[in-house]
Image (tube, grey):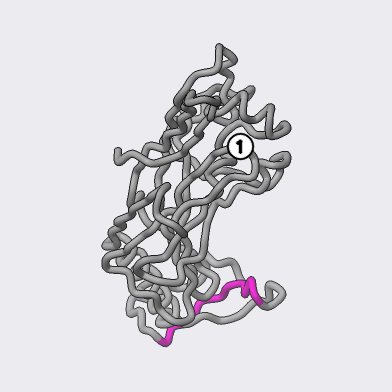
Amino acid sequence: MARISTYGLDTSISREDLLIGTDAEDNKMTKNYSVGSIADFMVKNDSNLLMLDQVKMRCEWSNRVPGQFVTSTLFNNLKYPLLKVDFENLKLDAGSTYKLIIERFKRQKKTNVRFVDSGYKRQESSGSEAPYSGRVIEIPITAASGQLFDFKLDLYYTCSGTITQNDGFFPKVAGSKNNATPFSSSKQYVAFRISKTTDGVTKTSPVLQELTMKGTAVTETAGSVVNHRRITFIPK
């Protein structure tokens, strides 16, 4: 094969023209690819991304409606809501996989190498110690309306000890370095996106919804001491 620079330029490109490339799904074999097939692939995936840009998300939550909340096994008397979601302009195409993704806001921090910018970051469950390794980062979307999503919200609070120890920390945010006297409430900020995977290619939407996640611990005394712990959302 001669040097590429010695070949002439094609000034009349057609769909039948061929390019040489590597097939990642076939043992990295060298193959020909038509300009037309590449163009079709780009249009298809650009349209997928454009469709995701049009999606809107409406959600509701409750710690009172049966079937729409979870009683935690990591804390005593802790309830957190499932997220009930209705999507607008979302068509679930056959052959594609859709997921709802949760991200948590992280402040700027400095590592040994560089500064990490602030913003919404996808949580990492792999590599985390138990129980935080059980965090649910993304959940398959099976319905465009009325689906309930359980993101294991109790795992976003300090809960690596016994239930009694966890109770003493709640609502301290997991990873927080605040070791002050126990407080009655805390806030953290989360955002949601959706992804669509077709033919091995994944496209992710912009942020569709931002919410404030609030943890509260309330002690009531009425003959006996009862500690109520709740996690809920506040529109941002």
Q: Quadrant of residue 35 in the image?
A: bottom left
Q: Residue 154 appears at what percent x and percent y? A: 56, 41
Relative placement, left or right, of 223 versus 143 is right
Q: Residues within 10 Å of mark 1 (few under 14, many from 20)?
A: some
Q: What secondary structure prevails in the magenta region?
A: strand
Using the rendered image of the protein, determine whether residue 120 is visible from the camera's viewpoint. Answer: yes
Query: At which x and y percent is residue 223?
Result: 52, 25
Q: Amino acid at mark 1?
A: Asn
Give the magenta-colored segment's residue range: 16-25
Q: Position of residue 23 (x, y in %)?
A: 62, 75
Identify whether 71 is placed above or below 85: above
Examine the image and state in which quarter residue 16 appears. bottom left
The answer to whether residue 108 is seen in the rendering is no
Residue found at the very far top of the displayed protein: 180
Is residue 18 magenta-colored?
Answer: yes
Residue behind mark 1: 76
* Residue toward you, 90 or 35: 90
Going by the image, does 143 lie left or right of 71?
left
Depth check: 161 or 16 in front? Answer: 161
Tag count in the figure? 1
Seen at 33% across and 49% down, the residue is 209
> Which image quarter holds the C terminus?
top left
Residue 83 versus residue 197 in the image, above or below = above
Residue 66: x and y in percent read 44, 57
Vertical placement of residue 130 versus 6, above or below: above
Residue 23 part of the magenta-drawn span: yes
Residue at the (44%, 61%) spot, across then down = 148
SS at mark 1 in the image: loop
Closer-to-camera residue (230/113): 230
